[in-house]
Image (cartoon, rainbow, N blue to C red):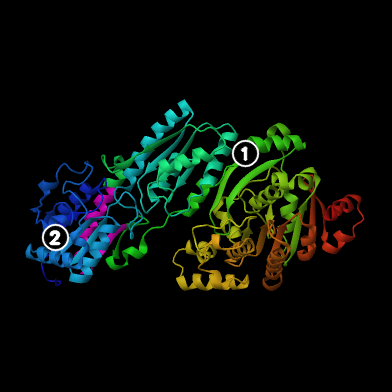
Amino acid sequence: MTQNDPITIGVLTSGGDAPGMNAAIRAVVRTASYAGYQITGIRNGYNGIFDQEFQPLTTRSVSNILQQGGTFLGTGRCQQFLTPEGRQEAAAILKKQNINTLIVIGGNGSYRGAAALHHETGLRIVGIPASIDNDVGGTDFSIGFDTAVNTALDAIDRIRDTAFSLARVFFVEVMGRQSGQLAAAIGLASGAEAVIVPERHTDVQHLTDLIDTGFDVGKKVAIIVVAEGNETGGATNLATQVTQSARHDLKVRVVILGHIQRGGSPTASDRLLASRLGVYAIQTLKESQLSYVVGLTQGVETATPLTNINQQEPKLNTGAMRALLERPLPWRQIAKQIETAGVRSFSIIFLTGLFSGMVLALQGALTLEKFGAKSLIGNAITTSLLKELGPVLAALMVAGRVGAGYASELGTMVVTEQISALRALGLIQPLKGSIHVLGERIDGRKERALYPIRKDIGMVFQHGALFDSETVEANVGFRLTRTPNIDHNIIEHEVQEKLSFVDLPEYRNRFPGELSGGQKKRVAIARAMVGNPTIMLYDEPTTGLDPITARKVLTVIKRIKEELGTTSLVVTHELHYAYYIADRVILIRDGSIFFDGTTQAFRQSKDPYIVDFRSLETT
């Protein structure tokens, strides 16, 4: 086909049907007719080419179909089209029918066949993504995805009603043999307790523990969304395994939504998406002789070369999945332990994720007002530490009944550091006093005014908070990949530089599950270093590590201070580690700074309380 040849179009729908396909056909036909192009419908997908089921289409052919589900042209999967000989035959038939442009409305399987047809015969192909799985490259959303999500949500909302009435656990199986996009969206939007997807290993015991933990604190209902392609063999098998291993006597039921997700009238979002992509597919025909797939990326119509489409298949949103699947904490049990400990002021902030450009998810806050809750750490800690202009490595230790006696049981050290860090980052406001970071008062500032300060702070949480389904390279470079218009070479250089600093340059293509505990900590440090922050905050960086590995991690922290001039705040209850790394020691007692001085001064202090505190090192 040359640029001067008249455009003659064949349009077909292929693969699994999706709500909105009719709307896409309608937009294609009406736009093509307006442009003066000849357009022919091909019935039953690629099968219609071999069976020569062609029908001319006009604007009257597509009237009153916008609101209808399915596809009036019919669809199907074609075995004959899978062979090179079959595709050559298909191209010859289309040429005989005087069709020089083929518009394919379907999913990734349809495009693999279309790409082969284009490569082998030169026929121009234009793809319009339509798949409830949302697994097509070149677009943020495919036609039919929104309708399928809403169809499943309607069903789960009804299931939840009966689940509450009868106190049952429901495993709801949705479509998605190779992609968890649909299941993830349904799970997040329905408030499911867990989502099981093909992209992520299913830890049945972890899932069972999650359900048991909820029931420990009085829950009687759980909804588990399961993609049909998960490794456990579907919702029925998974439900059986969980029932057998659970501590509680679970009343379990399984619902398989099946093909109900494919049918029904398309939502307004799918009708609009189908109409926009159908119009754009025709409008771009005059602009390019290439084969491409149209899509919608960040709200803008785009055309992606067909040869690149399989390299751009969307990945599961692991950040959102992590927030959803994070194991819930036993609220009542923690509250009881706090009351037993005799604590009179306590705030708990549960935090997952990592700042410094990472996904930060504030899961919930619990303030025990019956104890007259005040700020556990006032403005003194942030004022005295984060106003430092020179490189300092300070070890923060919390004393008192909570800090010394219940740290391992309640995770108090983690809570203490997270509250301080959240205030330093401006994510929560102090109950009294003020917060100064690098000489600037930040409490009360609007969100946007805090961005420059947050960029200057790196944070390393106790367990690293790495994304399990992403490589080390993707974890370290995550912040930069969210920076608009940044050159990929810059990201690659920054990742390599930071991994080399923590002595892990050869680990960039590994996954967190392949790393040791110490290596995970060092990867987390490398990620926090991206952007060269002025301040680094560390929460118990040696937790769970043997002495040799812990020393390696602490040595990296010392190097960051000494070689990069970074001010570092390390929360630890390990006195010997504090002595190894710290220039200054700050001891918190009853919510206030009790001691603030050099490490040597702390070790030589004759204060009875400090002497007693130091004795913990040998007990």
| Closer-to-camera residue (423/474) | 474
Q: Amino acid at mark 2?
A: Ile
Q: Residue furthest top?
A: 165
Inspect the magenta stretch and tell me whether residue 286 lies in it: yes
Which residues make up the magenta segment?
272-295
Label 2 sits on a secondary structure element that is: strand
Vertical comparison of 354 with 566: above or below: above
Residue 293, image quadrant: bottom left
The percent coordinates of residue 181 (x first, y second) are 39, 51
The one of 55 and 268 positioned closer to us in this rendering = 55
In the picture shown, does residue 266 fall above or below 514?
A: above
Q: Position of residue 298 (x, y in %)?
A: 37, 56
Q: Nearest the camera: 97 or 596?
A: 97
Can you give x and y, in whole percent of width and height, for residue 154 in the image?
36, 36
Which residue lies at the image location 10% right of the left edge and 46% below the top edge? Answer: 60
Q: CA distance from mark 2 to mark 1?
A: 61 Å
In-image side of 472 versus 311 (left or right): right
SS for callout 1: loop
| Residue 288 seen in render | no
The residue wearing badge 2 is 9
Give the number of the mark in front: 2 or 1: 1
Name the quadrant containing residue 215.
top right
User: Local crowd at mark 1 within 10 Å, few (<14), some, or many (≥20)?
Assistant: few
Q: Which residue is at 30% across, 58% downward?
A: 108
Q: Which residue is mark 1?
A: 330
Going by the image, does 13 lie left or right of 508?
left
- Whether residue 540 is in magenta: the answer is no
Amino acid type for the residue under numbered disc 1: Pro
Q: Position of residue 273 (x, y in %)?
A: 29, 50
Mark 2 residue crowding within 10 angstroms, few (<14) / some (14–19) / many (20+) = many
